[in-house]
Image (tube, rainbow, N blue to C red):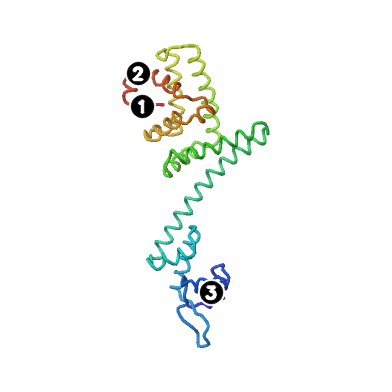
Amino acid sequence: MEYTVGELAKRAGLTVRALHHYEKLGLLLPSGRSEAGYRRYSEADVQRLHRVLALRHSGLALKEIALLMEAENPPLREVLERQIAEVELQLQRQQRLLKALKTVAARAHASEQGLSEHLFTVMSLMRLFEQYFSEAELQALSRRRAELGEARVRDIELAWHGLIQEVQASMTAGVPAVSPGVRALALRWRALAQQFVGDQAQLKAKVQAMYEQETGLQRETGVTPEMIAYLRQALNPREENNHDKT
């Protein structure tokens, strides 16, 4: 099937002027001409146009695309797969942002007081998670959160907030880490953490590293390296030597 310049522009959601510009840059040349000299575009031209637009949406300039199109001519399936992967990645990031915004919106409905601080916290946490975790790990954490459900996640977060206060109170009171009470706190801590990260040792290690290294997160949550060490001491030596940490 062949298309006129007007038909191709309409089907692709472009202007005729844009197609003429692509032709001037050598990005898309019509495969043929009618007897009257009008441009005619083939199915191969449609596939090439899609590659141009896919590269354009990825943020490349038209001159850069022209060089890339000269250097390679990948199959349409490969271009589609690249575009799908990029869109999926963008959607996943947008979904994480949406969840964060919903959290802020809920806080705003409850009270405007302290909302700016909460916004800063959300922005900081988003940056930290992207810094410490790979995209695959962020996806795994998102799936785990979805499996738990928002109601259960809120319950866990409330339980964790209370647990942090209990641990801090024991530390302030000078209760030995090896005492049965502190060990019980450490086991509760581990159980809550496992609900979020499961048995994935690498995720657990990264979460711990984030809390140990980020002072801003420590101030926000109250979880300090000293607290982590205190809880670790509450576990028996075999567990500690195996690095089965909080």
Task: Provide the residue designation for mark 1.
Answer: 244
Amino acid of disc 1: Asp
| Callout 1: SS | loop
Identify the mark nearer the N-term, 1 or 3: 3
Identify the mark nearer the N-term, 1 or 2: 2
The Cα–Cα distance between marks 3 and 2, rounded to whole angstroms, is: 74 Å
Percent coordinates x, y for residue 131 in the rendering: 45, 40
Task: Provide the residue designation for mark 3.
Answer: 20
Determine which quarter of the picture holds residue 16: bottom right
Amino acid of disc 3: His
Task: Provide the residue designation for mark 2.
Answer: 236
Q: Is residue 229 left or right of residue 99?
A: left
Count all numbered tags in the image, as a single digit: 3
Q: Residues within 10 Å of mark 3 (few under 14, many from 20)?
A: some
Residue drawn at x 43%, y 34% is 197
Residue drawn at x 42%, y 15% is 177
Amino acid of disc 2: Asn
